[in-house]
Structure formats: structure tokens, C-alpha cells
């Protein structure tokens, strides 16, 4: 009895693996493939989750980048362009608070 059950499960696995391979080769969406082949989309998803590898979770990787001041001569200005409507020249020694307020005002426009 146990070998019959194991055989039936192995057959079911082969059947669904074949269906999943056909689906991937078809270029169809899951829904369309199921519709054309009279398959229950919930069963399709169940077997897809059993066989296909799960995507790896995104991980955070901190990257270090050189500061802008280290990439340009200290005497040359920076230009901040906002929505291609505003161009702000930022010279060495600028006041960060004033720049923040200015950007806030422009953001509300």
C-alpha cells in the first residue's frame, strides 16, 4: 500500500514538473497557461512553489563613496539642478540651513 502511494506521488511530481517545464517554454502567463490547459491556478501555484527555486531575499549592502569635496577642487562651485527648472550654484562655505530652506520652498512650487 505504501509503495502504491509513493508511486502515485512520484507520478504526480513528474506530471507537474512536465507542466511547469511546458509553461516556462510557452512564454504564457500562469493564468493563461492554466486556462488553455484546464488547470486549477491554485494547484499550479502550489506545485510551482514546490519545484521552482525561491528568489533570494534582497540584502542591504552598504557602499562607501568618496565625498564630493574630495572629487573636485575646493574652490569650484557645485550646481544643484531641480526638475530642470532651477539651477542653484553652491560655493564653498555655503550655509546648509539656508540651502535646505531654499530647496523646501522650491519643492512646494
Image (cartoon, grey):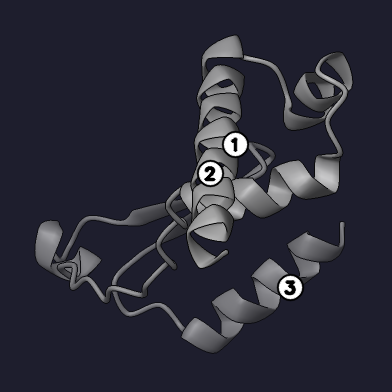
Residue 35 sits above or below residue 89 on the image:
above
Q: Are marks 3 and 2 in contact (CB under 8 Å)?
A: no
Picture disc at residue 104: 3
**What x and y, as percent, mark residue 87?**
56, 46
Work out whether mark 3 precedes mark 2 in sequence or the reverse, and give the earlier one: 2
* CA distance separating discs 3 and 2: 59 Å
Q: Are marks 1 and 2 in contact (CB under 8 Å)?
A: yes
Q: Residue at x 83, y 40 (%)?
A: 41
Circle 2 packing at 10 Å, graded few (<14), some (14-19), many (20+), is some
Judging depth in this view, the residue of 94 and 66 nearest the camera is: 66
* CA distance separating discs 3 and 1: 57 Å
Frontmost of labels 3 and 1 is: 1
Q: Is residue 81 visible?
A: no
Q: Which residue is mark 1?
A: 16
Judging depth in this view, the residue of 66 and 17 nearest the camera is: 17
Q: Residue at x 84, y 14 (%)?
A: 36
**What x and y, as percent, mark residue 13?**
53, 44
Q: Residue at x 56, y 88 (%)?
A: 97
Picture disc at residue 13: 2
Q: Residue at x 77, y 47 (%)?
A: 43
Amino acid at each position: 500500500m505504501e509503495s502504491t502511494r509513493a508511486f502515485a506521488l512520484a507520478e504526480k511530481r513528474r506530471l507537474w514538473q512536465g507542466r511547469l517545464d511546458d509553461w516556462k517554454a510557452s512564454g504564457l502567463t500562469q493564468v493563461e497557461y492554466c486556462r488553455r490547459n484546464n488547470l486549477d491556478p491554485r494547484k499550479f501555484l502550489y506545485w510551482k512553489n514546490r519545484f521552482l527555486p525561491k528568489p533570494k531575499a534582497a540584502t542591504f549592502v552598504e557602499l562607501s563613496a568618496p565625498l564630493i569635496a574630495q572629487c573636485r577642487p575646493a574652490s569650484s562651485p557645485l550646481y544643484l539642478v531641480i526638475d530642470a527648472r532651477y539651477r542653484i550654484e553652491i560655493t564653498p562655505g555655503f550655509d546648509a540651513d539656508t540651502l535646505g530652506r531654499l530647496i523646501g520652498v522650491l519643492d512646494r512650487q
